[in-house]
Image (cartoon, rainbow, N blue to C red):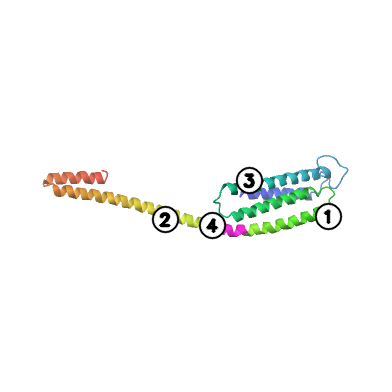
């Protein structure tokens, strides 16, 4: 909940900064120097795009290593979709980094193609996640049902063991009663065995 509120506040702050009317932040004035000049902002965006691309390209390497290391991963095709999505996002940032300087038509065409591919793979991954989450929720429900059944069976087995032990004590008690002819011994043995059985 707090993450959602923080995200909304961050977006609102960015909107306020972008739409601010005061003269504190120069806009479009190329003669200005300093951190808020257009040139420094463009350089920050350029560096950010390249760093984002590096991060996007490093994540799939780790995912591929994970897939290769673990052979019994379910839903490998979903991992492949994520890898494609992340690589394409990295390519759009990498190509976008070269558009801050004068660029060719081929670069713009490549950027457009990668953005279209990224959009298609992103939509496919989002649709896949919807179906996958439904499937995982069904599996979780089944898992909880099986855990509950296993707990109930363990409880029943425990009760059966206690009943077996109690019946064993009763048989032993009956055997002692039958072999003894003395009433005093019968009552004494019965009391001892009952107190042992009932933990008194």
Q: Is residue 198 left or right of residue 121?
A: left
- The residue that mark 1 highlights is 105
Marks 2 & 4, CB-CB < 8 Å contact:
no
Instruction: Report the residue at 63% width, 46% height from top.
Output: 62
Q: Closer to the N terminus: mark 4 or mark 1?
A: 1
In space, the residues marked 2 and 3 are separated at their CA atoms by 38 Å
In space, the residues marked 4 and 1 are separated at their CA atoms by 47 Å
Q: Closer to the N terminus: mark 1 or mark 2?
A: 1
Q: Identify the element where label 4 is drawn.
A: helix
- The residue that mark 3 highlights is 62
Q: Identify the element where label 3 is drawn.
A: helix
In space, the residues marked 2 and 4 are separated at their CA atoms by 18 Å
Instruction: Report the residue at 17% width, 47% height from top.
Output: 176
Q: Identify the element where label 1 is drawn.
A: helix
| Quadrant the C terminus occupies | top left
| Residue 161 percent coordinates (x, y) | 31, 50
Instruction: Report the residue at 61% width, 53% height from top.
Output: 79
Q: Identify the element where label 2 is drawn.
A: helix
| Residue 52 percent coordinates (x, y) | 72, 46
Residues packed near mark 4 inside 10 Å, few (<14), some (14 to 19) or many (20 plus): few
| Residue 80 percent coordinates (x, y) | 63, 54
Q: Closer to the N terminus: mark 4 or mark 3?
A: 3
Task: Give the numbered dot on residue 137.
Answer: 4
In the rendered image of this protein, does residue 186 appear above or below residue 128?
A: above
Q: Is residue 60 left or right of residue 168?
A: right
- The residue that mark 2 highlights is 149
Q: Nearer the viewer, mark 4 or mark 1?
A: 1
Q: Nearer the viewer, residue 72 or 123?
A: 72
Give the magenta-colored segment's residue range: 128-135
């Amino acid at each position: 909940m707090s993450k959602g509120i923080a995200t909304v506040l961050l977006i609102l702050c960015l909107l306020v900064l972008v739409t601010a009317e005061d003269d504190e932040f120069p806009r479009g004035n190329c003669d200005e120097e300093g951190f808020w000049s257009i040139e420094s902002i463009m350089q920050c965006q350029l560096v950010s795009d390249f760093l984002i691309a590096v991060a996007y390209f490093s994540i799939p390497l780790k995912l591929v290593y994970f897939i290769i290391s673990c052979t019994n991963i379910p839903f490998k095709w979903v991992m492949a979709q994520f890898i494609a999505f992340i690589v394409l996002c990295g390519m759009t940032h990498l190509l976008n980094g070269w558009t801050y300087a004068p660029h060719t038509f081929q670069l713009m065409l490549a950027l457009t193609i990668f953005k279209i591919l990224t959009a298609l793979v992103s939509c496919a991954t989002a649709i896949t996640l919807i179906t996958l989450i439904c499937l995982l929720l069904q599996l979780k429900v089944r898992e909880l049902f099986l855990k509950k059944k296993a707990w109930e069976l363990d409880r029943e087995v425990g009760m059966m063991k206690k009943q077996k032990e109690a019946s064993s004590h009763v048989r032993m008690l009956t055997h002692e009663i039958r072999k003894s002819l003395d009433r005093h011994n019968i009552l004494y043995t019965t009391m001892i065995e009952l107190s042992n059985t009932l933990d008194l």
